[in-house]
Image (cartoon, rainbow, N blue to C red):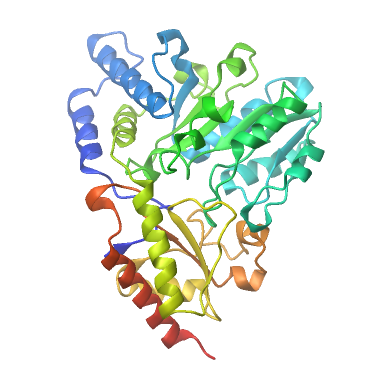
Amino acid sequence: MLYLDNSATTPLAPEVRDAMAEAYDEVWGNPSSLHSAGNAAERLLTESRRAVLEAMGIRNLPAVQLNRLIFTGSGTEANNIALFGTAHAKPSCRGMRIVTTPDQHPSVSEPLRRLEAEGFEVVRISVKGGALDIAELEAALDSRTLLLSIMGVNNETGAAYDAAGAFALARRINPEIITHTDAVQSFLKLPDPAGYQPDRLNADLMTVSAHKLNGPKGVGALYISERLLTGKRIVPIILGGGQEFGFRSGTENVAGAAGFAAACGLPRSPEAAAAARSKIIALLAERAPGVAVNQPAAAAPHILSLTLPDVQSETMVHFLSQSDIYVSGGSACSSRSRKVSESLTAFGLSPREAARTIRVSLPVGAGSEALTDAGCEAFADALAAGLARLYKR
C-alpha cells in the first residue's frame, strides 16, 4: 500500500496507541470527580494540555493560565467555537465585519455563511495563485472589523499563507481585531515553527487536530489568547457541566488527549516531505508531461495539487486505488459532494480543471515514516499508466 492521503488522515503511531492504551487501562476516571481516580484523570489531562501547548511553543505556564488550550472533539468543532464564540461574545459584535479568504475549509466557510445570514458582513480576500492579496486585505480592514481568519496551509492546494504578516497588518489598522488561524494542515508540518506557533503568529485563536499528526480521530484543540480570555471576548457554544474551563462542556476524552500529546512528541521531517514532493514533480515531468502542477506562491512541503489532462479526478482516484495507491480528489470533508472545489477555483482553476485535479499529501514523519524514492517512482509510474489507459486524446 502506498498511502498518499495524509491530509485526510494519518495512521495511528505505535507510541500514540501505547499512550492511549495506558490511559484506557489505568486512568479511566472522570476528570471532574473528586476521588483519587478522578484526580488521576485530571492530572493526565493537565499533562496532555501542557504537552500540546509546548508543541505550540508555549512553555512554563502557571496552572491558572492553562485555560489557553481547550480540548475539543475535532478541528471542525474548534473552528466553530472560534467563530461563533467570538461573534456571539457581545451584543455589540452583531453586524460587524469578518475578513477571510474564499478557500477556507468547510468548518470555517460554513459557519461564516451562517454568520452572514445573521447579519455579519463577511469579506473574502482573493488568493489567486495561492497568494493572499495584501492590497485587498488592507482595504478590507477597518475599525469595525471584528475578526480576521487566515488559514496556515490550504488543505487542497498546499498554499502556505503568511498569516503572521496578515495579522501584523490587521493589528496596525485595528489593535482590537481578533485573529484566528486554522492550523490543522500547518501545525508541526512546516520547516519553520514560526508558521504554527500562535505567539509568533500573533494569533488570538488557533485550531489544531490530532488525527492529521498520527494521533487519534475525534480529538482537536483550540488555543485562546490571554487577551481574549481576560476581555471575555469569546463565549462557549456548548453548554452543560462546564468542562474545559467552561468553554466546551462534556466529559473530556482523556485517552484521546493523551494520544494527542504523544503525537505532538513524534519526530518529524518536513524537509523529507519537501524532498519527496520535489522528486515527484521531477518524475512527472519525465513520465506524465501532460499533468499540470498547481504550484502555489509559497508551498507547504507535504501537499501537491495536480491537474490531469481530460481525466476526472474521481476516475483517477479509483484507478490508483486498484493498485493500493491512495490519493484524493480534494478535501476529505467535501470529496463526496458534487460541488466544484472553492479552494481550487479560488486558486485560479476553472470548474473543468478543478474537476480533473487530484491531491497528493505526503507523510511528514521522519525515518521509516518518510516517503522513499521508490515510493515516489511507484506513484509516478502508476499515474502515467492511468493516463495512458484513461486519457482519450
What quarter of the picture does the C terminus occupy?
A: bottom right
- In this view, the residue farthest toward the bottom is 393
How many dots with numbers?
A: 0
Q: Residue 308 in the image: x percent, y percent?
A: 52, 75
Q: In which quarter of the image is the N terminus?
A: bottom left
Up-down relation of residue 250 to residue 332 (above or below): above
Which residue is located at x 65 percent, y 26 percent? 86
- Residue at position x 49%, y 35% in the image: 196
Q: Is residue 239 above or below residue 127?
A: above
Lateral position of residue 348 relative to residue 106, left or right: right
Instruction: For residue 243, say whether it is visible.
Output: no
Q: Can residue 100 be seen in this view?
A: yes
Task: State left or right for residue 81 relative to residue 33.
Answer: right
Residue 269 appears at what percent x and percent y? 33, 45
Task: Kindly identify the residue that appears in the image at 30 percent across and 50 percent down.
Answer: 11
**152 left or right, relative to 58:** right
Q: Quadrant location of residue 66?
A: top left
Q: In this view, does 368 lie to the left or right of 109?
A: left
Using the image, determine if residue 67 lies above or below residue 278: above
- Name above or below for residue 63 compared with residue 50: above
| Residue 181 picture location, percent across and down | 57, 36
Name which quarter of the figure residue 129 lies in: bottom right
| Quadrant hosting residue 318 | bottom left
Percent x, y for residue 204? 59, 25
Foreground pick, 385 / 332: 385
